[in-house]
Image: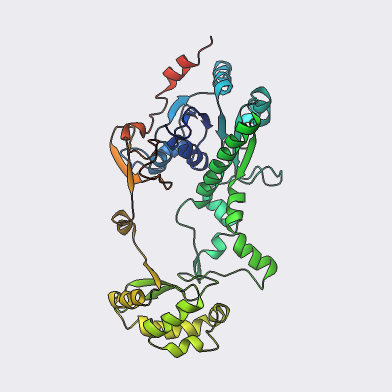
Amino acid sequence: MKPLEGILVVAIEQAVAAPVCSARLCEAGARVIKIERETGDFARGYDDVAGGDSSYFLWNNCGKESLVLDFKNQDDAALLHRILEQADVLIQNLAPGALRRSGFGSETLREKYPQLITCDISGYGSNESVAKMKAYDFLVQAESGLVSISGGVNELGRVGVSICDISAGMNAHAGVLEALLSRQKTGNGLGIEVSLFGSAADWMTVPLLHNDYGAKAPGRAGLHHPSIAPYGGYATADDEIVIVAVQNEKEWARFCAQVLEQPEVAQDPRFNSNKNRVNNRQAMDEIILAVINSLIRSDAVDRLEIADIAFGSVNSIMDLSNHPALQRRTGLSSTGKPIKFPARPIQKNPDASDDSSGDDSSTHAVPRLGQHSQSIRAEFCRQ
């Protein structure tokens, strides 16, 4: 038995943030009824690489039930109320105020259905000065300052995945689980609010504290960490890049002695603490590059392994696809094509008593638009 088996989730959702949350609940055994407009969740049309489905949509919608419903229609609104009467969780990320104007505001619903947990995901929260701003992931990356510290030294860069959407969905998932635990104690549902901006701002705590309480916020550092050194990418003689990560003074001493073969560098006053190495990064990097640039990558890696220094590669997506650490699960596209994508990030021990780690693709199928409308309408028909 999966942990959330018996939990009914209603997801009035689109795009990425709310579907990330409901997908995680679905994977843990919850029944998720996805409410879609007649034209469907617009994320269905982002691309068609996953067996005819959008890569985004397959990732975040396997195992859900699709119900086409117009909550502005009187009969459909009545149907939605009948479903909510039995539901445990409502998740929504429509435009601010859209559900409230139709009579389905979270506060109103919790009064009507005290057991209900509501989760409202927005772009910028409820502050009136920003509540109406459109909030797509890249816009929030820019507004939250994330773009200002991403990219190369002389070039701004977007983080290459929808990190604000994903972080908001993860926070919503955690909030729903906390609310379910709270309801076990009190018997009452809770209202949860999560914003993309708030999620991004939380992840921006370190540079924000440097700005507010330090000399200044870290600048863009390309393939180098802005406040730890050496921690970054160095080119080898065969045009590869090795990422080196030195985390403490013992490692720095080993790095100088066994990788650079210059033990005296560790005691140089310019480099004898992390703060000094960051302040004198250019001089330090000149010494490191003189050595790493002269070695082919395999030789550089041999030295790093002998010195027990952490290192990594700048892998391509093809490299990721073949990485030995990558575990996969199988989903079915809406056309029935098996698609392998990354396994759940939360793994159970092999001897776990539930079956939540299984890989039965029949339980991980992308629903066709409105695939379950008829059966759901029949199930929740007026008694």
Q: Tell which residue pokes out farthest to the right in this image.
A: 128
Give the image location of residue 303, x and y in percent: 33, 78
Along the horizontal axis of the image, is 333 left or right of 118?
left
Give the answer, above or below, for where 87 lies relative to 247: above
Give the image location of residue 261, x and y in percent: 38, 87
Give the image location of residue 365, x and y in percent: 35, 33
Residue at left offset 34%, top offset 60%? 316
Q: Return the residue nearer the eye: 22 or 35.
A: 22
Give the image location of residue 291, x and y in percent: 37, 84
Residue at left offset 34%, top offset 74%? 305
Give the answer, above or below, for where 55 lies relative to 81: below
Give the answer, above or below, for where 212 lies relative to 12: below
Report the number of discs.
Answer: 0
Residue at left offset 38%, top offset 29%? 368
Residue at left offset 57%, top offset 70%? 219
Give the answer, above or below, for where 109 lies relative to 142: above
Q: Return the residue nearer the eye: 249 or 63.
A: 249
Q: Which color mode does the image show?
A: rainbow
Q: Return the residue nearer the eye: 202 or 267.
A: 267
The quarter of the picture where residue 329 lies is: top left
The quarter of the picture where residue 209 lies is: bottom right
Q: Which quadrant, please, contains the N terminus?
A: top left
Q: Return the residue nearer the eye: 333 or 357.
A: 357
